[in-house]
Image (cartoon, rainbow, N blue to C red):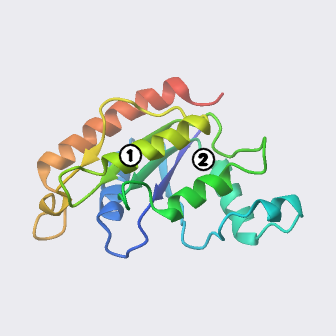
Amino acid sequence: MTKKIGFLVGSLRKDSFSKKVAKAIAGLFPADFEPVFIALDEIDMYNQDFDDENRVPASWTTFRNEVKEMTGFVFVTPEYNRSVPAVLKNALDVGSRPYGESAWDGKPGLVVSVSPGAISGFGANHHLRQSLVFLNVPTLQQPEAYLGNVTEMFNEDGTIIEGTMNFLKTIVDTYVPFYEANKKA
């Protein structure tokens, strides 16, 4: 069985550092894992009235179905104002509803925060983890994945430097057995 790992990137910018890091991480998974990038930019903003009144936007249905097909997740996020970007929080909210039908429930997660600053997206990383606890997404605790000063982690050709790639490989190599131990039956 293919293990479909959903990649959710909190930055919409076309040349975002988060997207570059996520693509690098995706390339480090073993062959029996299928990285799937899930678009967040077309999801209508969450409003419980739409669920309550049976007026669910098509974008929600598409997103919820895609998330339900995943067996685990990698969240790569920048930090906006010491928290996660609205687009990522919206995705968490949409996927968690309607009540009792969360598409996230019990699927192992990995959180990576990316920042040009020295604090490395610490606030976003922990805010995201707080939401994932409530959504019952078992999340890899160690090694923690904070990538600060990300602008210094790229070669001139746009590839990620060897030291950072080695760190990302360590994270993936740790996540894979964590995923296996925590995946839903």
In the image, taking residue 31 as reference, residue 114 lies left or right, namely left
> In the drawing, does residue 3 fall left or right of residue 28?
right
> From what the image shows, is residue 24 above or below residue 131?
below
Q: Determine if residue 31 is in view.
A: no
Hey, what amino acid is under mark 2? Met
The residue that appears at 12% across and 60% down in the rendered structure is 152
- Image quadrant in which the N terminus is located: top right
Disc marking residue 70: 2
- What x and y, as percent, mark residue 128? 47, 46
Q: Quadrant of residue 114?
A: bottom left
Residue 125, disc: 1
Q: Is residue 140 left or right of residue 118?
A: right
Front residue of 66/117: it is 117
Instruction: Estimate how packed mark 2 is, as few (under 14), some (14 to 19) or many (20 or more) residues with alpha carbons within 10 Å.
Output: many
Q: CA distance from mark 2 to mark 1?
A: 21 Å
Give me the residue at 65% from left, 38% from top. Answer: 105
* Residue 63 appears in the rendering: yes
Circle 1 Cα neighbour tier, 10 Å, few/some/many (<14 / 14–19 / ≥20): many
Q: Quadrant of residue 101?
A: top right
Query: How many tags in the picture?
Result: 2
In the rendering, which numbered label is found on residue 168?
none
Left or right of residue 132, residue 74 in this image: left
Dot placed on the residue nearer the N-terminal end, 2 or 1: 2
Residue, far front: 81
Q: Quadrant of the C terminus?
A: top right
Secondary element at tag 2 = loop
Question: For the point 35% across and 57% down, which residue is it?
Answer: 79
